[in-house]
Each structure stands twice: as structure tokens, then as C-alpha cells.
Amino acid sequence: MVCLARFEQDPMNEVLNLWSPILKENQVLNLQLHPLQKQVNQVKLVESLEDINVQTVNEVGVDINLLVEHEHFHNQLQFLSGLGPRKALRYIQNLKARKPIYNRDMIKKENILGDKCFGSSAGFTKVRVPLDKR
């Protein structure tokens, strides 16, 4: 029931939580997106779906403070421009050590993320600050 409620609130995040970089563990391939889906080369399908995930996450953006507070949002970060699964994991660990973040400049000044990765992902990063901290 929790999954259905989360899907209703944030369908993109719930679909991303089905994602795995390992082809046999990627549950997204079990979704019936098209009747002829099984006829397509699965590796190419995963590559195309990964491109769509990156485009979608970058269009919506990622709220860093919300992501740190709720573990079920962590999977979004690997699709942020300039990151991947390993860099996203390290980024989350660094964010948790220095939370909360009050602005994007803190990410760069405190070396939470490297310069190149920061340059690629900063435009798609949201930082919502609690009202009492503004």
C-alpha cells in the first residue's frame, strides 16, 4: 500500500526505484510498455530507458535536502547529469555528513561534490531550506 501511495504522489521516483544497472535485476523491464517490448534487444532498451530517466530527472530536478531526509529518493540522484551510481552514492554520503544544505554554493565550497560534477549537476539541483532557516 505504501508503494501505491508513493506512486500516486511521485510516479517518477517509484519507477526509478525499480531501476538496477544490472540487466537481470532491472525490474523496469517487467513493466509492459509495449506489446512487442520483448522482441527488442534488451540492452538497447535499457540504454534508451536510461537516457529517458536522465532527461526526466534533469527536467524535474532533485531536491537535495529532501533526498537526504528520505532514503526512497536516493535512486534519483544517479540519473542527475554528471553523476552515475557510484558518484551518487558518494554524494549522498557527503551530504548526510554535512546536512542541511542552505544553497548550492555550499556544495562547492565544502567539497561535497567535485568541480566537474558540480558544474554538470548544479542547474538541476534544488535546495529547499526550512522556513525557520531562511
Image (cartoon, grey):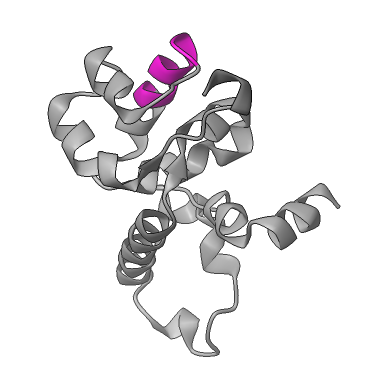
Please give the name of the residue rendered at 44% of the width and 34% of the height, measured from the top-left corner.
127
Of the pair 78 and 99, the residue shown nearer to us? 99
**Rendered image quadrant of residue 97:** top left
Tell me which segment is drawn in magenta. Answer: 90-99
**Rendered image quadrant of residue 5:** bottom right
Of the pair 82 and 105, the residue shown nearer to us? 105
**Rendered image quadrant of residue 8:** bottom right
Of the pair 112 and 134, the residue shown nearer to us? 134
76 inside magenta stretch:
no
| Residue positioned most to the left | 116
| Residue positioned most to the right | 1
Residue 4 in picture, x, y percent from top left: 78, 58
Placement of 104 over or under 122, stated as above or below: above
Please give the name of the residue rendered at 31% of the width and 40% of the height, measured from the top-left corner.
84
Residue 13 left/right relative to 38 = right
Please give the name of the residue rendered at 41% of the width and 50% of the height, measured from the top-left corner.
61
Residue 114 in picture, x, y percent from top left: 19, 24
